[in-house]
């Protein structure tokens, strides 16, 4: 799948929204990717998972690691496509943690999978946890990289879409956004 085909999937599933959004990072944007809407249908999940897996090849992970919630569905599918183990991190008191008896071994080949990256906070947290366990991090596979090329976590990044999307700090909003009510569609 090329970028325009992936973007078409997001448009057809109403996963690419236009309006005034507050992102998880606290920044504001005119666009929002609600990947969960695109990932409702298993044929779409399978298609996007295969496209991400193909971006990462020839790397062969032992484990796919995803931060909850956004990375869960696509992370599990990428792991299924590779035929490897899938584990995830979840938030406890606002911080990602490896729970449920999951562990990583020293040198274990880990691929991080996430749905959308804007400022890279969750990917960075995930990398730090994998490094703490001395895993061999192969890279991060991301459905949508909307970081404007600003996120460099020090590992290879593989994305299906790389978009330049304007984001704004809350105290520096353009007039058109000030005039539109805000929405926070992520995990609300």
Image (tube, grey):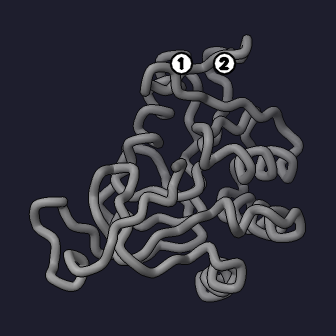
10 Å crowding of disc 2: few (<14), some (14-19), many (20+): many
Classify residue 112 as left or right of residue 42.
left
Tag of residue 134: 1
Label 1, secondary structure: give it. loop
Residue 118 lies, in percent from the top left, at 39, 58
**Contact? badges 2 and 1 (CB < 8 Å):** yes
Q: Which is more N-terminal, label 1 or label 2?
A: 2
Say which residue appears at 43% left-offset and 58% top-offset.
184
Mark 1 residue crowding within 10 angstroms, few (<14) / some (14–19) / many (20+): some
- Label disc, if present, on residue 54 of the rendered structure: none
| Residue 149, quarter of picture | bottom left
Question: Is residue 16 placed above or below 115 in the rendered structure?
Answer: below
- Inspect this view and state whether residue 16 appears: yes
Could you tell me which secondary element the residue under label 2 belongs to? loop
Q: What is the number of the mark on residue 104? A: 2
Q: Which tag is nearer the camera, tag 2 or tag 1? A: 2
> Which residue is found at the position 53% from the left and 68% from the top?
33
Residue at 47% across, 70% down: 32
Specify the quadrant of the image occupied by residue 146: bottom left
For residue 5, above or below residue 144: below
Image side of residue 48 versus residue 141, left or right:
right
Residue at 46% of width from left, 42% of height from top?
123
Indicate the position of residue 57 as horizontal and vertical percent values. Answer: 71, 58
The front one of 183 and 102 is 183
What is the quadrant of the N terminus in the image?
bottom right
């Amino acid at each position: 799948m090329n970028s325009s085909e992936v973007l078409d999937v997001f448009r057809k599933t109403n996963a690419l929204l236009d309006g005034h959004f507050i992102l998880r990072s606290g920044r504001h944007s005119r666009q929002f990717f609600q990947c969960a809407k695109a990932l409702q249908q298993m044929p779409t999940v399978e298609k996007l998972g295969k496209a991400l897996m193909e971006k990462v090849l020839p790397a062969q992970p032992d484990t796919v690691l995803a931060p909850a919630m956004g990375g869960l569905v696509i992370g599990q599918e990428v792991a299924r496509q590779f035929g490897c183990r899938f584990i995830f991190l979840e938030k406890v008191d606002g911080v990602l943690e490896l729970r449920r008896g999951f562990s990583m071994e020293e040198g274990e080949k880990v691929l991080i999978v996430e749905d959308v990256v804007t400022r890279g906070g969750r990917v960075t947290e995930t990398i730090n946890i994998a490094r703490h366990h001395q895993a061999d991090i192969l890279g991060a596979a991301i459905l949508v990289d909307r970081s404007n090329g600003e996120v460099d976590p020090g590992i290879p990044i593989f994305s299906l879409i790389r978009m330049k999307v304007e984001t704004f700090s809350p105290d520096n909003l353009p007039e058109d956004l000030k005039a539109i009510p805000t929405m926070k569609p992520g995990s609300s």
